[in-house]
Image (cartoon, rainbow, N blue to C red):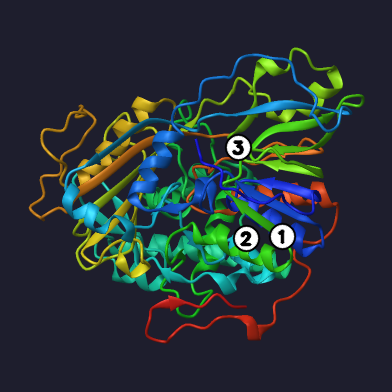
Amino acid sequence: MIDIPPYPPLDPSNYDLIVVGTGVSESVLAAAASSSGSSILHLDPNPFYGSHFASLSLPDLTSFLHSNSVSPPPSPSSPPLPPSNNHDFISVDLVNRSLYSSVEISSFESEILEEHSRRFNVDLAGPRVVFCADESINLMLKSGANNYVEFKSIDASFVGDSNGELRNVPDSRAAIFKDKSLTLLEKNQLMKFFKLVQSHLASSTENDDSTTVKISEEDMECPFVDFLSKMRLPPKIKSIILYAIAMLDYDQDNTETCRHLLKTKEGIDRLALYITSMGRFPNALGALIYPIYGQGELPQAFCRRAAVKGCIYVLRMPITALLLDKETGGYKGVRLASGQEIFSQKLILDPCVTVGLESLSSLTDQQNETLSVLVPKSMINKEKIARGVCVIRGSVKANVSNALVVYPPKSLFPEQLTAIRVLQLGSGLAVCPADMHVLYLSTLCDNDDQGIKALLSAMSNLISLPVPENRQSDSVVENDTSETKPILLWRALYVQELVKGEFGGTISSMPSPDGNLNYNEIVESAVKLYEKLMGSEELFKEETSPAENTTEEENDGGVEIED
């Protein structure tokens, strides 16, 4: 239970919008609504910004996962009571649901880690990077939030296999010709494919109906994996395109287990994001960048922009109840943990906030309708995401600090149904001490055991695990290569529920972090909700003055995010 500091009563007590949670979606929406002139109160029950997208020290990450992995016991069932100061309203108590399960945290070098524990900025929802052409970058430039965050490039991308080999992702003309693992025929095939994609994208952009080569409508509607086969690309090249460039999760060759069989038009859109990210910013090494000090800097950047526009922020302040009109059942406001009642026209809630089922039995149909988006529903899609964080001494690839590694489906063991992504980050990004790296791992799964096994398999392939490993299984692949693997110092394993956001008119809920590598769907959810709340009003109508943009030292390796 978070201790509530002795805040003075908030003034004013009426707002256009109350937002609870400072994740990426909530922060983008708060910044956009503030920019439009709306009065916003932005609350977070945590003592830090970012909610489920926060970057935390090792002790804080440990504390957060343990305290949010077990749902608190429900309070005794009782009918909603009217607030003491206004009998026109009733209050409905709120509860928090847990997003995390199977939390397992191990420290193997306690003394070293305790000495440096506050020098870590560890992401709660990793691995996640920013594509240079990501919609989050576009919104940062449009809103001016780019003034509050700095980025550096991801040095390289690799595709891994069960033998411990990490092969470079040939994502550009120069990379293709330098790649010694590709035969001359494979290089020519890959170059031919990328030329076709670029020609198609150019013709689509320019509305050119001339002789420019385009992909046919028939091919655009067929499965992407079939189109790649039609292009006579060998399995190795197909795997790189599908899982290391298009960043797909499920095995596209197995229609029985594949939950999302990608069409060619969707695949081309994913390639377009990657291709347009290459070279967008002059000092970015490739398509991917990452915020210095961790991904928690992204929501903070939008929060700072919102604060400039008048948004009021209060951390360590949960809401304990909703206030509903006794007669109409409509939403009126919230009760804070401090006991103060705050009113607003609309409310946006963190995905953890819900209402206890026992509270609904005594409500009217209209009151239940108002709360419908907060009622826990039996999820048809049981999909989860398993996440892992490792602190290691050494690097998974010699002379490479910041790198993305992708293990396509079945690349580690036959039962591997989904791709596993691994992101290594070094001290140059201010996420760990100089002689260490942080590894983030994730994979989609149906249940906790399946996800944890897949993560342990990737860990065993990349790093030296402590022996004996009490969770060894047949699916854990050992790498017998002679190259010395980095040593594991600390590890966290956990499984996160995937919760979709929902628009409910006056009360809406935001989604939990998804399983994607980028922020496009997270930002898209905020944009769609903003449009529903504000109508056709454009996001961030004001243009940022070029003079406001921060500049980097030429030799610090930072990436300038400017139009």
Toward which corner of the image does residue 537 lie, by quadrant?
A: bottom right
Q: Secondary structure at mark 3?
A: loop
Give the label, 3 or 1, closer to the camera.
1
Crowd band around label 1 with a 10 angstrom C-alpha radius: few (<14), some (14–19), many (20+): many
The residue where tag 2 is placed is: 303
Amino acid type, label 3: Pro
**Rendered position, 178 above or below 8:** below
Give the percent coordinates (x, y) of residue 22.
59, 51
Label 2 – label 1 distance at C-alpha: 8 Å
Residue 520 appears in view: yes
Q: Is residue 80 left or right of residue 385?
A: right
User: Reading the chain from its start, which is encountered first: label 2 or label 1?
Assistant: 2
* Disc nearest the viewer among 2 and 1: 1
- Residue 519 picture location, percent across and down: 55, 53
Q: Nearer the viewer, mark 3 or mark 2?
A: 2
Amino acid type indicated by mark 2: Cys
Q: How many marks?
A: 3
Q: Quadrant of residue 28?
A: bottom right
Closer to us: 53 or 486: 53
* Residue 495 seen in this snapshot: no
Labelled disc at residue 311? 1
Going by the image, does 330 lie left or right of 31? right
Residue count near mark 3 (Cα–Cα under 10 Å), binned few <14, some 14–19, many ≥20 = many
Gap in Å between the C-alphas at discs 3 and 2? 18 Å
Asked if labels 1 and 2 touch by Cβ distance under 8 angstroms, the answer is yes
- Residue at 21% x, 29% y: name it: 471
Distance between the alpha carbons at the discs numbered 3 and 1: 21 Å
Q: Position of residue 235 (x, y in %)?
A: 35, 46
Name the residue tied to disc 3.
Answer: 351
